[in-house]
Image (tube, helix red, strand yellow):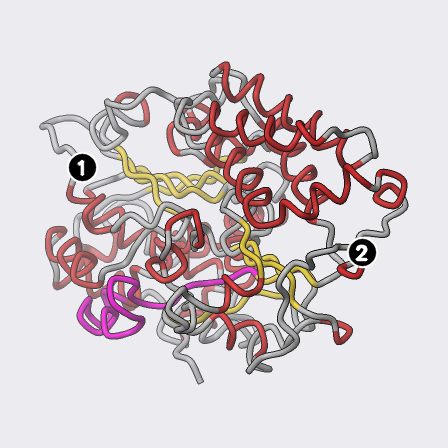
Amino acid sequence: MAQKILLKNINVPGINTFEVYRQYGGYAAVEKALKTMSADDVVEEVKKSGLRGRGGAGFPTGMKWSFLAKPEGVPRYLVCNADESEPGTFKDRYLMTHTPHTLIEGMIVSSFALGANTSYIYVRGEMMPQIRILEKAIAEAKNAGFLGKNILGTGYDLEIYVQPGGGAYICGEETALLESLEGKRGNPRIKPPFPAIAGLYGCPTVVNNVESIAAVSWIVNNGGDEYAKIGIGRSTGTKLISASGNINKPGVYEIELGLSVEEFIYSDEYCGGIANGKRLKAVVAGGSSVPILPANLILKLSNGQPRLMSYESLAEGGFATGTMLGSGGFIVMDEDACIVRNTWNFSRFYHHESCGQCSPCREGTGWMEKVLHRIEYGHGKMSDIDLLVDVSKKIEGNTICPLGDAAAWPVASAIRHFRDEFEWHVNNPQAAMDGNYGLANYADPIPVVEEAN
């Protein structure tokens, strides 16, 4: 059984309340950090842990903290990114719903480490139930003396506020989030300066994901070295995975990084195999913004070794044969899934969510949506396929924020690995419109996997 850190007590009745959470060791990290450690000690433990940002980028958390500027007389801020707008990802919402004090405790310890006296949790606007849950948890912690003035008599002051977002995907990007938090339109900022130098209200700011912050308490309680023993290589610790699609057991799973992809898909402990006895066709491993991989490439590396659920293993081979762990939005597709329709659906989303600040993204996402729509609905030309590849290249790397890349990668990878399917749609427009896009229709079937070896 894999070790659980964030979801260990998730099924304990009442774990969402302060009293029960405290009975199970909650807020011990706050007591330890504030009473026996310095801020630098906490940062050092997080560095030793190897914890990497769980929102998608995978940047080392302790290193990010160490970049924070500390000018005299200037406030510093910690902002928790709880926007979670990535299609296929729902693990942060799950964590906030069922064990909100895990996040609040992590916020207190992290704020202490950063020297922040005011911190914010920016929550996606549609998540009103989670906003109410967090506000209640904050009130409970404050009533117990873990928030407010002179916490536990240590002289440290902290207030945490929950800020609903406007429901914009772009506000998951940290500088757009800060713009929104300041009351402005959520447009990404040009960097540098980075938020660690000039972030919220022009002050030094750290923006971290819910899962990243929630893991800090365990690290403080048990030590960074112990956390680093979990996982594999530079992919240390555990990771929450949002599993969805054509599987028997969709849900949120906490895995030790280094688990094989094959075991994650087919093991009864996790996804339980492909639903309805179908075959595996493809997987989007890290949320809609990462490259899609066919079954043969998601399960095995080029050397025949099993591909692992880790930052390095999933990325091995680059975008030619690899992908990204991203935010852990693991979308599984069976043999009947239409890759063209799925890609069009993703493109429609990114066109809608583009802030419009950068021309390549504003115009390019719209072009990709239109071209994919006509291929899917029987009006495509063979030249449209190469046109999509060309447009994706024009977008990638040419925008202020990563949304352009996020829109380009799924399209480019879908054509790279499933070009036969796009060509079949062009050559068989009526059949494609009727939904007859099963594997049996292709002259050269896409590689699929019957079952786990």
Label 1 secondary element: loop
**Residue 16: mark in rendering:** none
Q: In this rendering, is residue 198 above or below 443?
A: above
The residue pinned by badge 1 equals: 68
The disc labelled 2 sits on which kind of residue? Asn
Residue at image location 38% in from the left, 28% down from the top: 175
Give x and y (percent) for residue 108. Answer: 30, 52
Picture quadrant where residue 125 is located? top right
Q: Residue furthest bottom?
A: 1
Q: In this rendering, is residue 264 above or below 110?
A: below
Q: Is residue 259 magenta?
A: no
Q: How far apart are the alpha carbons under marks 1 and 2?
A: 56 Å
| Quadrant (top left/top right/bottom left/bottom right) for the N terminus | bottom left
Q: Return the residue nearer the eye: 125 or 275.
A: 275
Residue at image location 47% in from the left, 75% down from the top: 9
Q: Which residues are magenta?
A: 219-242
Label 2 secondary element: helix
Give x and y (percent) for residue 415. Answer: 59, 42
Give x and y (percent) for residue 330. Answer: 55, 58
Residue at image location 60% in from the left, 72% down from the top: 271
